[in-house]
Amino acid sequence: MAMSSALLTDHYELTMLQAALASGASRRRAVFEVFARHLPHERRYGVVAGTGRVLDALAEFRFGDAELSFLRENQVVNDETLDFLASYRFSGDVHGYREGECYFPGSPIMVVDGTFAEAVLLETVILSILNHDSAIASAASRMVHAAGSRPIIEMGSRRTHELAAVAAARAAYLAGFSSTSNLMAGSVYGVPTAGTSAHAFTLLHSSEYDAFQAQIDSFGPDTTLLVDTYDVAKAVRTAVELAGPDLGAVRIDSGDLAAAAHEVRQMLDTLGATSTRIVVTSDLDEYAIAALDAAPVDGYGVGTSVVTGSGAPTAAMVYKLVAREDADGVLQPVAKKSVGKPSRGGRKNAFRALDGGAAVAELVSTSPDEPAPEGARPLLHELVRGGEIVGREPLAAARERHRASVAELPPLAHQLSQGDPAIPTVFS
């Protein structure tokens, strides 16, 4: 049985619940919306990721004996609230952007509609997942575009929390990475895994020759040999001597990668290993990948930058109440007026306006039942209906959706410099 996700929340969610139960407001219908006021680092677009994990968390959002005992022993809430939590089941509706879809400031990425008591408790876990995964996917998408047709391996597990590493591998794959080094991501989410050896393997043996021979004996000549432990030129000659011209690949993990790649390519070709690939690693990000565009590189390995969102480890998303039921049972728009942190009231619908297949605007309407305008496609899809999850889909579908969504964007979306969003968000 999966672990309960109910305590993946903030203390104040439960104190709000207790007070709302006491006032009688807890049963009021409430609509919460997840959106980002801006794109981190003034990027041109963001990528929605984590929706599937949100649905997993929602399915396990149950207060069992262990969770209730913790809350009782620590006097977090009173007995009335504990009784409510013991039978908690989300019975509302959730709509949202599908995973892999691009988003922009103000996009209603997820809409949660239920009683206040049911919906308020989901704020922290939803934001925790969407903020993390979308930050990773947004950075990964930029790296994939910079790499062009060259594959990228996600290899940042050792640079983040052990569970965040699994989620990061999933998000990076969704955004176009070819594989991950993280075996748990392979086991849980079916992400292809890859990896060969580190410098420790070479240092373990009496010589580089012995290390390469051992690896080739185990995995065949199509393996990838790490050639920068000692002397790159000598290592390349040794690698081809042992594996022959069918050597799969060599990896360079230090130094001037562009210069080293040119040197190694020339050596490999001279030695007859013309089909041997060159993979580079070493603190790469989208800017370093773009700078290597003209180098004879066949693939990249990215670690720290992708699992930390390449400098933007959160997507800056918020979860705000935008509508609530009044005393007459009518849903009324509500909005914050805080300086610098305003929100737009009312339940919303969203569409991507297209012109000849190219995205030109994000259309956000407070008339949630209106049909898609001509030349636009709907962005909000049903994820949960009456508490039942209906929006699950394979990770491969999200990966393909991302390819299609990015392909719609105008060319300026892929500029790595800071700037305005690639398309405007138009509210009506």
Image (spheres, helix red, strand yellow):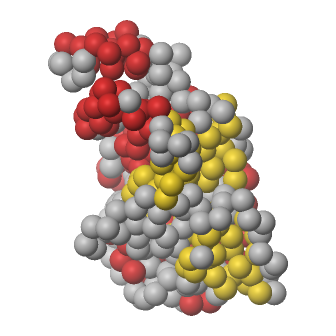
Give the side of residue 235 with respect to residue 244, left or right: left
> In this view of the protein, which residue sits in the foreground, 17 or 416?
17
Q: Position of residue 25 (x, y in %)?
A: 39, 35
Q: Residue furthest left?
A: 74
Place of residue 214 in the rendered image (x, y in percent of width and height, measured from the top left): 50, 44
Q: Position of residue 332 (x, y in %)?
A: 51, 54
Asked whether, in this view, residue 283 is left or right of residue 185, the answer is: left
Residue at image coords 68%, 37%: 385
The quarter of the rendered structure image containing the C terminus is bottom right
User: Dividing the picture into quarters, in which one does residue 121 lie?
Assistant: top left
Q: Residue furthest front?
A: 328
For residue 324, above or below residue 249: above
- Whether residue 80 can be seen here: yes
Residue at 41%, 70% in the rendered image: 37
Task: Out of 104 and 191, give the one closest to the viewer.
Answer: 104
Q: Residue at x 47, y 32 (%)?
A: 27
How many marks on residues? Answer: 0
Where in the figure is residue 337, as x and y percent of width and height?
Answer: 32, 67
Q: Nearer the viewer, residue 94 or 133?
A: 94
Residue drawn at point x = 28 percent, y = 73 percent: 340
Asked whether residue 135 is in view, the answer is: no
Question: Is residue 30 positioned above or below 8 on the image?
Answer: below
